[in-house]
Image (cartoon, rainbow, N blue to C red):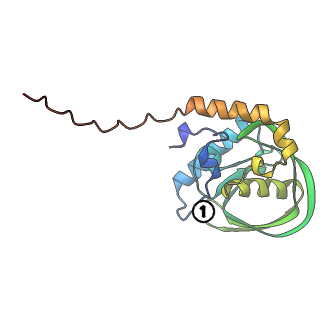
């Protein structure tokens, strides 16, 4: 299943869908998370949400410092208790070459489950809280393009156009259905 996974890029419509909660904790879910870690590392990212691999489920993986012991998996995350604001530059694996300044809450509380369905409850400040917010945005169908102001959109218009063109090339529109044939009139004798 997850062997054919790949990171999908904007403007793929799957990135804009609201993800569904997970209620089955099995080997398939663990395998998906493992493959997502592989893809995240290959792309030199710090987080990857399931919608970014075409799976609209509420799951994301992250590793804020690249150390093997820092791998984290969050299932059905809920963010709360936001405190303070902080602006920093963010990029996104589904929007390659796009980096924009984004204001996020400085401190967040997260409730989620691990791959075995056991509860997780954490509060973090700074970079980890930012990663959580970015990845939960993905689970809610929100992208960096939604957080960009007009100046940032203008600055990145060439890259966004290239991504649109690549998506159109890889996903040509389906041919129109055949039109119903008009009945031919029988020739009069």
**Which residue is located at x 51 percent, y 35 percent?**
173
Give how far across and how far down residue 73 sits, in percent. Answer: 69, 55
* Quadrant of the image occupied by residue 159: top right
Image quarter (top left, top right, bottom left or bottom right) of the C terminus? top left
- Judge from the rendering whether residue 130 lies leftward or rightward of residue 8; answer left or right: right
How many marks can you see? 1
Looking at the image, is 81 positioned above or below residue 40? below
Q: Residues within 10 Å of mark 1 (few under 14, many from 20)?
A: few
Q: Nearer the viewer, residue 18 or 187?
A: 187
Q: Nearer the viewer, residue 28 or 139?
A: 139
- Judge from the rendering whether residue 57 lies leftward or rightward of residue 152; answer left or right: left
* Quadrant of the image occupied by residue 8: top right
Residue 100 visible in rendering: no
Q: Secondary structure at mark 1?
A: loop
Give how far across and how far down residue 100 sits, in percent. Answer: 85, 44
Outermost bottom residue? 81
Give how far across and how far down residue 126 sits, in percent. Answer: 90, 57
- Judge from the rendering whether residue 179 lies leftward or rightward of residue 123; answer left or right: left
**Which residue is located at x 62 percent, y 42 percent?**
12
Residue wearing tag 1 = 116
Outermost left residue? 189
Give how far across and how far down residue 156 sits, in percent. Answer: 81, 36
Looking at the image, is 71 positioned above or below residue 117? above
């Amino acid at each position: 299943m997850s062997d054919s996974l790949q990171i999908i890029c904007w403007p793929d419509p799957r990135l804009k869908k609201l993800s569904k909660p997970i209620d089955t904790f099995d080997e398939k879910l663990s395998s998906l998370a493992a493959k997502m870690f592989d893809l995240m590392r290959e792309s030199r990212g710090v987080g990857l949400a399931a919608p970014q691999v075409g799976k609209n489920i509420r799951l994301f993986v992250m590793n804020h410092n690249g150390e093997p012991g820092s791998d984290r998996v969050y299932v059905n995350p809920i963010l709360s208790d936001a405190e303070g604001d902080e602006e920093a530059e963010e990029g996104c694996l589904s929007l390659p070459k796009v980096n924009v300044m984004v204001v996020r809450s400085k401190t967040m509380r997260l409730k989620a489950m691990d791959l075995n369905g056991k509860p997780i409850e954490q509060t973090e400040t700074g970079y980890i809280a930012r990663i959580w917010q970015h990845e939960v945005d993905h689970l809610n169908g929100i992208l960096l393009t939604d957080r960009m102001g007009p100046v940032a959109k203008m600055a990145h218009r060439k890259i966004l156009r290239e991504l649109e063109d690549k998506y159109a090339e890889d996903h040509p529109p389906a041919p129109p259905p055949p039109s119903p044939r008009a009945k031919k009139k029988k020739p009069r004798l």
